[in-house]
Image: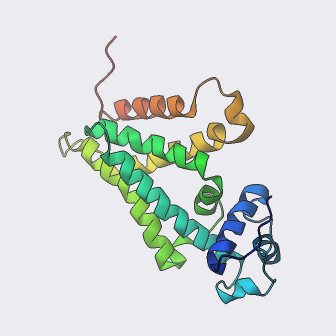
């Protein structure tokens, strides 16, 4: 871990950045407030000017992560090919890209055991980010008759679970290095099978 000296006047953000590095290095339960303070180059008491404890620091990191994640998902959904399927697939790729590029944020958001609904700001950031996937799903299933249309929230949650599984098994660390297919290929083929099984996409031509 690269030790930094606190000198730029933003103590709160310096502590968040130190927290993110420690999460990547040791996991969300593997460090203390004192270690975060040391990594930021401040006294052990300094973090308490902004945070009540380590969970509070992780929650701030997660909130910032969800804000970034929401921006990325929104950008992925609205750029390029405007078709509902293309937009839907783009959000899946954005999920993988975020997890790969920002592992500290990703772990804080999804793997730290935070009680997201206990913090209104964190809950709002999380809901806004995940709503992008739900909206993409709504557009994708809109062509189906209401009588056979699956709930968009259910579909988006299934895709979220699939995306998270691909991240955990293939997009980070050694398992990903040994996979015979790219995480993107695994996710897109899995999504295709799932959507065809629900009748959202037509069967592939043989």
Residue 77 position, x and y percent, is: 34, 47
Q: How many marks?
A: 0
Residue 166 position, x and y percent, is: 58, 39
Along the line of sight, the residue nearer the viewer: 140 or 71: 71
The residue lying at 39 percent from left, 40 percent from top is 90
Q: Is residue 47 left or right of residue 184?
A: right
Residue 40 position, x and y percent, is: 75, 73
Quarter location, residue 172? top right
Quarter location, residue 48? bottom right
Give the vertical position of 11 relative to 112 (above or below): below
The residue lying at 78 percent from left, 76 percent from top is 37
Which quarter of the image is occupied by the N terminus?
Answer: bottom right
Q: Is residue 201 left or right of residue 91?
A: left
Residue 154 visible in the picture: no
The residue lying at 38 percent from left, 46 percent from top is 76
Residue 29 visible in the picture: yes
Q: Is residue 155 left or right of residue 68?
A: left
Quarter location, residue 131? bottom left
Which quarter of the image is occupied by the C terminus?
Answer: top left
Q: Is residue 141 left or right of residue 58?
A: left
Give the vertical position of 179 relative to 127 (above or below): above
């Amino acid at each position: 871990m690269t030790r930094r000296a606190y000198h730029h006047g933003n103590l709160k953000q310096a502590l968040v950045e130190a927290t993110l590095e420690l999460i990547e290095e040791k996991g969300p339960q593997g460090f203390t407030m004192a270690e975060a303070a040391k990594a930021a180059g401040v006294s052990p008491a300094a973090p308490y000017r902004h945070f009540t404890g380590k969970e509070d620091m992780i929650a701030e990191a997660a909130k910032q992560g969800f804000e970034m994640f929401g921006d990325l998902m929104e950008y992925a959904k609205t750029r390029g090919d405007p078709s509902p399927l293309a937009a839907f697939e783009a959000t899946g790729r954005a999920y993988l890209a975020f997890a790969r590029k920002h592992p500290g944020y990703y772990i804080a958001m999804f793997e730290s055991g935070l009680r997201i609904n206990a913090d209104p700001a964190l809950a709002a950031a999380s809901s806004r980010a995940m709503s992008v996937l739900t909206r993409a799903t709504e557009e994708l299933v809109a062509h189906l008759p209401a009588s056979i249309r699956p709930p968009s929230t259910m579909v988006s949650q299934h895709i979220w679970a699939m995306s998270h599984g691909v991240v955990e098994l293939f997009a980070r660390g050694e398992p990903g290095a040994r996979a015979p297919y790219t995480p993107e290929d695994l996710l897109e083929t899995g999504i295709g099978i799932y959507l065809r099984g629900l009748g959202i996409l037509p069967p592939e031509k043989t």
